[in-house]
Image: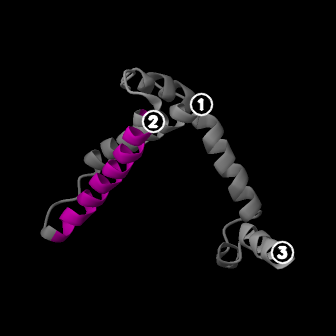
Amino acid sequence: MIETFGEYQLAARRTQNTELPLWAKREHAKMGLVSEVGEIMGLFQKTYQGHTFDESALKLEIGDCFWFLSELCDCYGWTLDEVLQANIDKLKIRYPERFKPEQSINRIEYRDKQLEGHRK
């Protein structure tokens, strides 16, 4: 059983196409991720046509998203662990206590860019 993102990334790497050049591997990962998100949306869209929502299919499609994210991270030499930690670090800065709509609207990084524009 896989217990960490690092273990997952190593296991997923086994099924990557190692014959693709790096540029093609990056394209494959990006296109595959978008395709899998489309498949997730398709599961929800089908409910408007009377289909029963298939949670087990959703679980598999989310897994496919992780596979393509893992491949994309590999292309840049990143681990899933470090990418996820960077995301949490960013969110702690943006929302120091918890999510607040006003902090989403008036993001620190937006203010910093506005200040740069006024300095020029």
Instruction: Kindly state the secondary structure of the residue where label 2 is placed.
Output: helix
For label 3, the residue is 120
Give the residue displayed 41% in from the left and 45% down from the top.
30
> Identity of the amino acid at label 1?
Gly
Task: Estimate how packed mark 3 is, as few (under 14), some (14 to 19) or many (20 or more) residues with alpha carbons within 10 Å.
Answer: few
* Residue 80 on the magenta span: no
Give the mark nearer the N terminus: 3 vs 1: 1
Residue that label 2 marks: 23
Look at 24% across and 59% down and name the residue there: 42
Q: Which residues are magenta?
A: 25-48
Residue 78 at x, y percent in the picture: 60, 34
> Does 22 sit above or below residue 59?
above
Most distant residue in the left direction:
50
In space, the residues marked 1 and 2 are separated at their CA atoms by 13 Å
- Up-down: is 90 above or below 86? below
Q: Which residue is mark 1?
A: 77
Vertical placement of 42 versus 86: above or below?
below
Amino acid type indicated by mark 2: Trp
Q: Residues within 10 Å of mark 1 (few under 14, many from 20)?
A: few
Quadrant assignment for the N terminus: top left
Q: Quadrant of residue 98?
A: bottom right
Q: Quadrant of the C terminus?
A: bottom right
Residue appearing at x 77%, y 74% in the figure:
111
Q: Nearer the viewer, residue 83 or 100?
A: 83
The residue closer to the viewer here, 34 or 96, is: 34
Lower position in the chain sequence, tag 1 or tag 2: 2
Label 3 sits on a secondary structure element that is loop
Task: Please state the total of marks drawn on the protein image.
Answer: 3
Left or right side of 66 for 42: left
